[in-house]
Image (tube, helix red, strand yellow):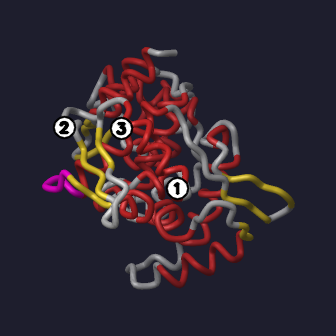
Amino acid sequence: MRDFKFHNNFTLNRERLSAMLRCVVQDRTASREAVAAAMGVNPYMVEGFRGWLCKTGLGRFERKTYTIAEFGNAVAHYDPYLEQPGTLWGLHYHLVASQQEERAAVWHSFFNEFATPGKSFTSTEMKAYMERTLAHTANSLGYVPDDCKEFLKCYVRSEALGSLGLLHSSKKDTYEVVGTQPDISIVAYVLFDSWQRRFPTFDTLRLTQLCEEPEMIGRIFVMGRTQVRQTVGMLQSKGLLTFADTQHEPVTRRFHDNPLAFLAHSYQSL
């Protein structure tokens, strides 16, 4: 699936996306018309929401068959209407940190490169940055403006991911990046999932890596160093990792099981 304009200019709407998820969980080979009927939309809109289904990590579509991902199965079981904080953070995480074959390029670039806590920017500044940094990507420039618009809608509108509070629109066409720290179970899910994907053979990373490396918790949650250090302390108190406050700042993971266990815990604790 393409990295740009995967949404076909259809803004993320969790109510419609949840209807698609519930439909394809029941029938992995559901036709476009059947999915459209379940969603209450025209068949053309299914193409756009199929893009959201894939980019948010819920599933994939290939050769007229849907495949529901592990994350998608957990969501379908615990939160089929996409309402709980753990689900919203999971959707955000997968948009920002998906594997290359399912990457949402503007989302990935924004949080892993552009965003810093408290950063203020306009849509024009964001578009200029994306056009400059993504210029090497074939056929990207014509789609970047549309993706920038959809990105901003995604993090401002409540029917999408606006309730996460990662972006604040202070005045017309001006936005501020707001770092946040969700429930520790959600942070643990993201930390150990990204660690497992990006550094599978390393049991020890530096604290700076957790803060600054792409797709790690400092980037996903736009947390500053102090917040990341506090989070590491909380995870250490639960026996999930250890941290030594020395020159090399080693953070060593003790947890090696499926990170989805933390997401399930966040649902069960509600």
The front one of 183 and 1 is 183
Q: Earlier in the sequence, mark 3 or mark 1?
A: 1
Q: Where does residue 151 sit, x and y in percent of width and height?
A: 60, 57
| Cβ atoms under marks 3 and 2 closer than 8 Å | no
Q: Earlier in the sequence, mark 2 or mark 1?
A: 1
The Cα–Cα distance between marks 2 and 1, rounded to whole angstroms, is: 39 Å
Q: Foreground mark, 3 or 2? A: 3
Please name which of the two marks, 2 or 1, marks the residue nearer to the observer.
2
Is 2 positioned to the left or the right of 220 in the image?
A: left
Spatial distance from mark 3 to mark 1, Cα to Cα? 43 Å
Inter-mark Cα distance, 3 to 2: 14 Å
Residue at the disc numbered 3: 236
Magenta segment's dominant SS is loop
201 drawn magenta:
yes
Whether tag 2 and tag 1 are in contact, CB under 8 A, the answer is no
In this picture, which residue range is highlighted in magenta?
199-203
Neighbour tally class for label 2: few under 14, some 14-19, many 20 plus, Cα within 10 Å: few
| Badge 2 amino acid | His
At 48% across and 53% down in the image, what residue appears?
220
Q: Which residue is tagged 1?
A: 8
Reply yes or no: does residue 261 show up in magenta. Answer: no
Q: Which mark is residue 256?
A: 2
Residue 260 location, quadrant: top left
109 displayed left or right of 180: left
* Residue at image location 30% in from the left, 62% down from the top: 100
Q: Position of residue 238 (x, y in %)?
A: 35, 29
Point 40% across, 84% down: residue: 136
**Looking at the picture, does residue 123 appear above or below residue 46?**
below
Which residue is at 36% across, 45% downward? 191
